[in-house]
Amino acid sequence: MSTDGAVGFIGLGIMGLPMAQNLIREAGRELIVWNRSKERSEQLANDNDGKVTVVSSPRAVIESCSVTFSMLSTPEAVEAVYFGSGDGSALLGVSAGKHIIDCSTLTEEASQKTAAAVSEKGGKFLEAPVSGSKVPAEKGQLIFLCGGDKETFDMVQKELDVMGKRSFFLGETGAGTRMKLVVNMVMGSMVAALSEGVVLAENTGLSTETLLEVLDLGAMANPMFKLKGPQMINGKYPPHFPLEHAQKDMRFAGALGDKNDVSMPVAAAANELFIAAKAKGFARDDMCGIIEALRNKPKKKGIGSGSMARSQRARCECAEASAPRTSHTSMCRPQGTKSSATCEKQTDRANRPEILAL
């Protein structure tokens, strides 16, 4: 089984845009696209003459295609795009014969909610969160972690192959999300450990370049240290995987551990560093900006790419609306306090329209 006609794509941010480019250039597909900021859609259309049709709403994308991919930055973005008020929401375009592949990283519950809503409308749903950031997306080297409808997974295998180097079908909806959160929890803990090592070397008279060379020659060698280490040393953090998104995934992983009675003290400590880095103004920089939580200096103009004023308003968010349990609260704390018993809602997220464009 294969897809016919144009393919839909919703969300053309840091990840979505290169993924869409690969569908056009490597798979030879024509696309019908929507993005909250229309400039991104028009950019894709201008770069691929005659291959891209820009439409006015998520609903219009899904109504025009049998297969639609979405890549949105947060559960809030998915909620707005799929379940939002108005006549342009994505679910209004779903009917029998429609296949929805959502590549966003959500909570297990959020992914299952979308799957149920799509199924109720007669469509098929596949969750397909990815392991990989901007450069793997550009090179078609993502790893797709899929759950949900197996028929849809088989149908879009060619498209997954041009956007990624491997795709895994893990079972029911929610399994892909759980795997993604486990993977990103390990990654977040590793980058936190690397940041501590670099700062310790800086403050004990050691060459940080030599530290990275030693790590790369030993059993701990890995591509992430090789990529993120020099950025930490240079204090430049162009966003390949924004720090605020990494912290979101650490928070969701903490909630998953709480739900399954798994204690994760290492991940909880790493999450505290991500929260501290957000508070210092590095939310919109790359995740390796976590190192700034350990450096005793404020963010300087020109370092990284985040907005200081915006990030100073950032607060830790609860992963669930229900009352937090013990290990969940260890992953959340209000800015400026030592207690981890409660957390505050991020006050400025709703006022950042660009959130849906990622």
Image (cartoon, rainbow, N blue to C red):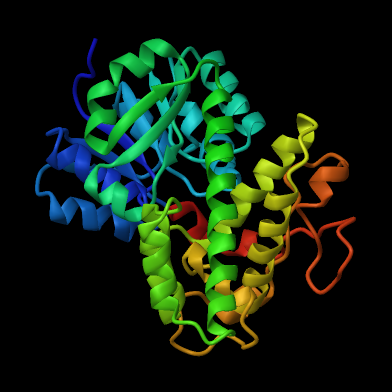
Judge by depth and name the residue closer to the eye, 138 or 269. 269
Judge by depth and name the residue closer to the eye, 85 or 343. 343
Residue 112 lies, in percent from the top left, at 61, 25
Is any atom of residue 238 visible in this view? no
* Numbered circles on residues, count: 0
Dividing the picture into quadrants, the one containing residue 169 is top left
| Residue ID at (55%, 55%) | 190
Using the image, determine if residue 135 lies above or below residue 177: below
Dividing the picture into quadrants, the one containing residue 197 is bottom right
Judge by depth and name the residue closer to the eye, 43 or 272. 272
Using the image, determine if residue 335 lies above or below residue 71: below
Using the image, determine if residue 267 lies above or below residue 67: below
Dividing the picture into quadrants, the one containing residue 100 is top left
Residue 127 lies, in percent from the top left, at 48, 27
| Residue ID at (59%, 46%) | 185
Residue 42 lies, in percent from the top left, at 24, 56
Q: Single out the residue that lies furthest toward the left.
A: 49
| Residue ID at (50%, 74%) | 306
| Residue ID at (29%, 22%) | 156
Q: Left of 186 or right of it: where is 152? A: left
Quarter holding the N terminus is: top left
Q: Left of 289 or right of it: where is 58? A: left
Is any atom of residue 246 visible in this view? yes
